[in-house]
Image: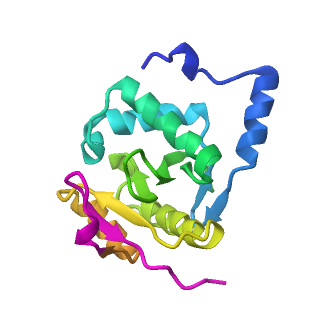
Amino acid sequence: MKVKSWQKPMTGQAAVAVDRICASLPRIARGRIILRAPYLEDYPLFESIVTGERGRWIGGPLTTEAAWLDFIQMVAGWVLRGAGLWTVELQATGERVGFVVLNHETGDPEMELGFLFPAENEGKGYAFEAGEAARNNAFFALNRDTLISWIDPENARAIKLVERLGAQRDAASDIDGSVAYRYPRPEFEV
């Protein structure tokens, strides 16, 4: 994959500014994983997920241009909505394993919890750990009253994941061919 000029990481003082901004975003360590601010270096993994076969679960596969716009839109959510895309990495190694997002996309009636993980990281519990941390952030740090996940009805693994996270089917909130799963506010864990 050839890196476009606007996708190249910043250097010098601009890199210092990026680090300062990213350091101000929530960083959550939980179990084996860390949710941290996304950097441009994370984009190739994001692009490989959404432009590949797994992109079908989010209305794709996306073109490379649409993938870039989706990435920057989710990152901009931090500035505009106080929530957005997190890169999920392993605490032990720093390896990037996927993404979790609290996102309020254009046209959606409310904030959504979403997951983007490559096939090789499926079934390892990373999405569950990241989803639980992001869900709790939405309810306890952002004081959201409601949170939802919209899922392709054929994505059985994602449905199983959100049910494991406590979400319940909410057919009245289905949109655009996706089925809705609503999260009840969890009890506060000390």
Image position of 18 with respect to 175: above or below: above
- What percent of the width, then of the height, locates residue 91? 62, 56
> Could you tell whether 62 is left or right of 71 in the image?
left
Q: Measured along the vertical axis of the image, is residue 190 above or below residue 107?
A: below
| Residue 185 within the magenta-colored segment of the rendering | yes
Which residue is found at the position 24% from the left and 56% from the top? 178
Q: Residue at x 23, y 70 (%)?
A: 171
Dividing the image into 4 quarters, which one contains the C terminus?
A: bottom right
Does 140 lie within the magenta span? no
Residue 138, image x, y percentages: 56, 66
Q: Which residues are magenta?
A: 169-190
- Residue 156, given in percent of the width and then of the height, sits at 22, 62
- Residue 115's image quarter? bottom left
Kindly report the secondary structure that dominates the magenta region of the rendered protein: loop
Q: Residue 24's x, y, as percent?
A: 75, 49
Residue at 59 percent across and 51 percent down: it is 81
